[in-house]
Amino acid sequence: MLFPDRRLVMVCGRSYHCNRSCMLFPLAILSILTSTCLSTTSDTLSQNESISDGKNQTLISANNTFELGFFSPGASSNRYVGIWYHGLGNQTVVWVANRNNPFIDKSGTLMFDGEGDLIVVDSRGSSFIIASVSGAQGLEAILLDSGNLVLRSVNDSRQVLWQSFDYPTNTWLPGMKLGLLGRQNRLLTSWRDDDDPSSGDFSFGGDPNGTAQLFIWQKVSVYWTSGLWDGQIFSLTPELTKEFFSFQFVSSSDGTYYTYSVRNSSILSRFLMDISGRIRQLTWIENDEDWVMFWQQPKFSCDVYNVCGAFGVCNELNLPSCQCAKGFEPASPTDWGNGYTGDGCQRTTSLQCESGGVDDGFLEMANMKFLASPMRFLNAEGAEECKLACLHNCSCTAYAFLEKCYLWDGDLVDLQQFDNDSTGKTETIYLRLAASELESTQSRGGKRKLLIIAIPVSLTVLIFCSILCNLWIRRQRHKGTKILSHNLSLLALGTTEANDLWWSEQRDSQFSVFEFSQIAEATNNFSTENKLGEGGFGPVYKGQIPEGKNIAVKRLAAHSGQGLVEFKNEILLIAKLQHRNLVRLLGCCIQGEEKLLVYEYMANKSLDFFLFDQTRRALLDWGTRFHIIEGIAQGLLYLHKHSRLKIIHRDLKASNILLDDDMNPKISDFGMARIFRANETQANTNRVVGTYGYISPEYAMEGLFSIKSDVFSFGVLLLEILSGTKNARFHQHGNSLNLLSYGWELWKEGRWFELMDQSLGEGCPRNEMVRCIHVALMCVQENAVDRPTMSEVIAMLSSENIALSDPKQPAFYTVSITAEADATGDIDGNCSMNVVTISAQDGR
C-alpha cells in the first residue's frame, strides 16, 4: 500500500524487494520459518504470528464489527488482503491493502518480516509490503472496532506507527480523515469495476487548495463539488448533512481535512466512491439485511454528471441546459451530444491581463447558485473595491460582493443559473472576460446606434492620434538613452510572435528602461567586487538601485557569438510573464554598444550551485527538493497553458532555475523561448538550440519541438534533483551510458532507491521518492506522445491515489553524454556556452 511501484528481484534464489540487502535476507527467511499461524480468532497479529490464506484465518475486531483477511472480489480469482464488515449477509469490503498488486492463488501469508514490515508473501516468493515502519521492533497489528488496521508498539499501545486510515481506498468510514495532511492529499479512489479493486478513474476528497469543500475528480478533472462548508451544511448539498451525522472540517498546522462521526454508534454507515463516479452514503438496515442508500451525490436535471465542466452553465429551467458561459466555447465539441461538456469550456478570447494589461471587464450573471470553486475572501468596503481587487489579480476569474468580497481563482465549475429567483437563494456573480468579449455581448441594435456615433468620433480621434503619434516619434529620436531611442528598430528585429505580443498590449508598469549611468552607479561601475559570475552572454553583476532594492544585471559581451537575438527575445517575452515561479525582468538598457538586462536578485543563486556540489547539496533535504520540483512544474504549466500564449522554454536545466531567499524556484533565461499560437501544437526549426543532455530526441534529430520537449527536459532535471548527479557528467555504470539509462536499469530491476542522492539520508518518504522517479521516467520516454503534460505531471506528483502507467524505455538509451558537451548553442553548428550558465560565488 505504501510502495505500490516497488519491484521484485531474485536474491539468493528467491524473489524479494530490492531495498533489502542480502545481509538482511536471512532474517526474512528466519521470520518465515519461526512465525506461527494464528491459532485462535483474535483482533491482534503479533510479530511472530502469521495469517495463511489457504487456512481461512482472519483477524476480527473486538466488537465483531470488522474482519481482516484474504478475499476474492466478485467473479475474480485474484487474491487480496482486505477489511470487510464481519457477519453481514454479503461481504462488504471497505479497504484493500494490495489493490494494484493481486496474488493469483491462495498460497499467500500475511506476516511481519525480519525488519518489522507487515508483508504478504506467496509460495513463489513474490511479496508485497503493506506497511513499512523503518525497522521498528516489538510490534503488533491490531484491527480496531472502527475498521482501522493499526501497527503499534507492544510496550506502548498509544504509539501508532502506521494505520490503514491514512491510506483509504474507496470507502470513507467514521473517524477517517480526508484531505490534506502534510504533503499527502488523502482521497477515496473508486474500484476499476466490481471484480477489480485496482484504482479507477474517480476520486473523492478535500480541496487541495485548502478551501472548505469536497470535490470529485474524474482522473485529474474536477466534475463535482459539495459547496463550501459553513460549519453546519455544505452550500450546494445541504441534504448531505443528515441528522445522524456530525461533520467536522479541521484547519490546523497539520493540514486541512474532513472527518465525521455517526451520532448513534449502533448504526453501520459508510460513504462509498463507486465505479460510476458517484459518492454514496449507505446504511445497513438489519431487518432488510442489506445496505440502503440514504444519500448520493445529487444528479441535476440538466446534467448526468452534476456539472457542465469548467465555465459551463447548467440552467435548470431551459433544456438542453448545458451551455458555455458567454465568452467561452466548448473545449471538446464532441462531448456536447449528451449534454455533458467533458473538458468544459475555453475562452474564445484570452484575458488581457495575461499579457500584462488590465483591459478586462466583468459579465454580470444574475440568479446564480453560489459557486463551489476555490475561493478567497477579502475585507472590502464595497463592490467597487472588490471588483478592482479581482481586476488587478490575473488569476482571479470572478467575484461577488455579498457583505464581503468573494474572489474565485482558476476554472469555475458547477455554474448553475435560474431563469428567475423565487427562492431568494441565488446571487449575482461577475465573470471576468476580455473587453472585446464584453462588447460582443451587446445587442446588435445597440451596436448600430453606437456605430452611428462612433464612426465620426473615431475618425476625429484617429486624425488627432496620428498627429500626436508623429510628434511623439520625432521627440523619441532626440531623447537618446531615456526611452529605447533607436531600439524601436532593434526590438522590431525580434520574432514576429514576440513582436506582436509586445506591441499589442500595454507595457507592464513595473518594467523600466534604465539609463546606462543608473546601472553603472548601481553596480559600483561594474566593479569586480560586484561581479557574480560569467556566462556565454557576458558578465553578471549585483547592484542596488536608489530604492534599496537589489538587482542582478546581465551585460551583453561584445565578443558574444550569441546573445543579441536572445537579448531581444527576453525583453519582448519575459516582461509579459507574471508567475511566482518565473524570474522577473525588471528592465533593460540599450545605449550604443551596451545592452543590459536587469532582473530581480536571487540570493541563493541557481539550483546547480547546490545540487552538483558534494558539500552544498546536503543543504537540499527532501522537503526542499520536493518543493523545488513542484515549483518548477507549476512554472512550466503556466508557460504551457495559463499564460496568454503557449510558450516553449527550450532550455530548461538546473543552472536556469534560480532560488530566492526561501528556496522558491524561479525559471529564468527565456532567450531561446518560442511562442505558440492557440492552434499550434509543434514547430520545426533548422537551428536546434539548447543544452546537451536536456534536449528531447525529436528536437535534436528532427528539429521538432513542442510542450513535450520541455516535459522531457523537466524529466531529466527531475532525475538530477533526485540523484544529485548531472546527466552531462554522468560516469558510466555498467552498461548505462547516461543518467537516463542508469535510472531505467535500476527501475526495471527494482533497485530505484540506489538512484537517490546519498546525502538525503534515512527517514525520507519513500513513497514520494519512488513516485518522483516514476514520473521522471514517464517524462523522458522516447516518443513525445507517451510523455505526460505538465498538468498531468502535477496531478501525479500531488496525489498517491492516481495510478501511474508503466514507463517505456527512455530516449538516448544508448547515447553517451559527455561533460564536454554541456554547452548551449546551435546543435548542428557552432556551440557556445549558454548565456545563463554562471559560476557564481555569491547570490544572483
Image: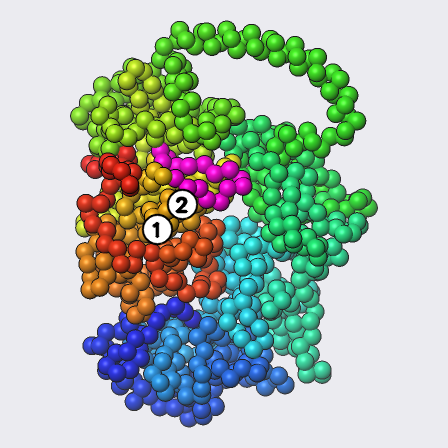
Front residue of 61 and 109: 109
Please state the horizontal and vertical placement of residue 802, each as a whole percent of the image: 48, 62
Colouring rule applied to residues: rainbow
- Give the distance between the C-alpha atoms of the residues marked 2 and 1, in whole angstroms: 9 Å
Quarter placement of the C terminus: top left
Q: Residue at x 46, y 29 (%)?
A: 496
Q: Residue at x 33, y 88 (%)?
A: 35
Q: Is residue 387 left or right of residue 808?
A: right
Q: Is residue 645 above or below residue 1?
A: above
Q: Amino acid at mark 2?
A: Leu
Q: Residue at x 59, y 42 (%)?
A: 408
Q: Is residue 326 left or right of residue 559?
A: right
Mark 1, Cα crowd under 10 Å, few <14 / some 14-19 / many 20+, is many
Quarter placement of the N terminus: bottom left
Mark 2, Cα crowd under 10 Å, few <14 / some 14-19 / many 20+, is some
Please state the horizontal and vertical placement of residue 458, each as a whole percent of the image: 66, 15
State the residue position of label 2.
704
**Start and end of the magenta stretch?**
670-685
State the residue position of label 1.
697
Task: Give the total of numbered labels.
Answer: 2
Q: Is residue 255 visible?
A: no
Q: Amino acid at mark 1?
A: Pro
Identify the main secondary structure in magenta.
Answer: loop
Residue 830: quarter of image: top left
Q: Is residue 123 visible?
A: yes
